[in-house]
Image (cartoon, rainbow, N blue to C red):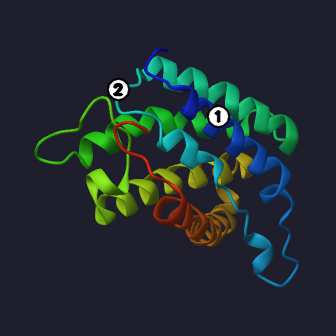
Amino acid sequence: MNELKLRDIVRLLLFILIQVLILKRIVISAPFLNLIHVFLFPLALLLMPFGLSRMTGLFIAFFAGLILDFFYDSPGVIAASSVLLMYMRAFILKWLEPRGGYIVQSKPALGILGRRWVISYTSIGMGVFLVAYFSLEAFSPVYIISILAKSIMSFLTSMVFVLFYMFVLYSGGRNA
């Protein structure tokens, strides 16, 4: 667990707090807009260092997801979605790997990997999390239209928050 720095742990806890105290309370009661659920929490998992071992990442995702499940009254749904995201993260990173590879001590950051890579990486990761979350929440193929609608609407809204964070607030990089 020495791959993690205090900053990563603080960011994860801060994202959990933001998710529970602010984003969970966003309720839009207009027609078709009630499908929107804003998630920023998965970004904290996506921003973990490249050198983080898979087991450590899965462990962190599971327990962070359990904390959120407690507040969302969704027994295991967020934890399972988070674990799937962290498991798939290795495949996503491999698929998007630049020619020179990654600097193991660094993290996903705009300054190192560029806009296109950051948008692709966060989009794929958020998509995996949201589809898993809404599929597990409904837990039936009967609701496929609802699952897809919620996933798409939530993806679009969540990505606004994710990209704002990545392009405006996050410095990232080797020493971050």
The residue sitting at 45% across, 32% down in the picture is 87
Q: Could you say which quadrant of the image residue 51 lies in?
A: top left
The reply to whether callout 1 and callout 2 are in contact (CB within 8 Å) is no
Q: Residue 110: percent from the left, percent from the top?
A: 36, 57
Circle 2 — which element?
loop
The residue sitting at 48% across, 59% down in the picture is 166
Q: For the view shown, which residue lies furthest in the left direction?
A: 99
The residue sitting at 76% across, 79% down in the picture is 33
Q: Which residue is mark 1?
A: 10
Type of residue at label 2? Gly
Q: Which residue is mark 2?
A: 51
Q: Could you say which quadrant of the image residue 65 lies in?
A: top right
Type of residue at label 1? Val
Q: For the view shown, which residue lies furthest in the top direction?
A: 1
Q: Residues within 10 Å of mark 1 (few under 14, many from 20)?
A: few
Of the numbered discs 1 and 2, the one sitting upstream in the chain is: 1
Is residue 90 toward the left or the right of residue 97 in the image? right
Circle 1 — which element?
helix
Q: Residue 176: percent from the left, percent from the top?
A: 44, 39
Q: Residues within 10 Å of mark 2 (few under 14, many from 20)?
A: some
Q: Residue 5: percent from the left, percent from the top?
A: 51, 26
Is residue 94 toward the left or the right of residue 126 in the image? left
Q: Is residue 73 visible?
A: no
The residue sitting at 59% across, 46% down in the picture is 42
Tell me how far mark 1 sits from mark 2, CA to CA: 18 Å
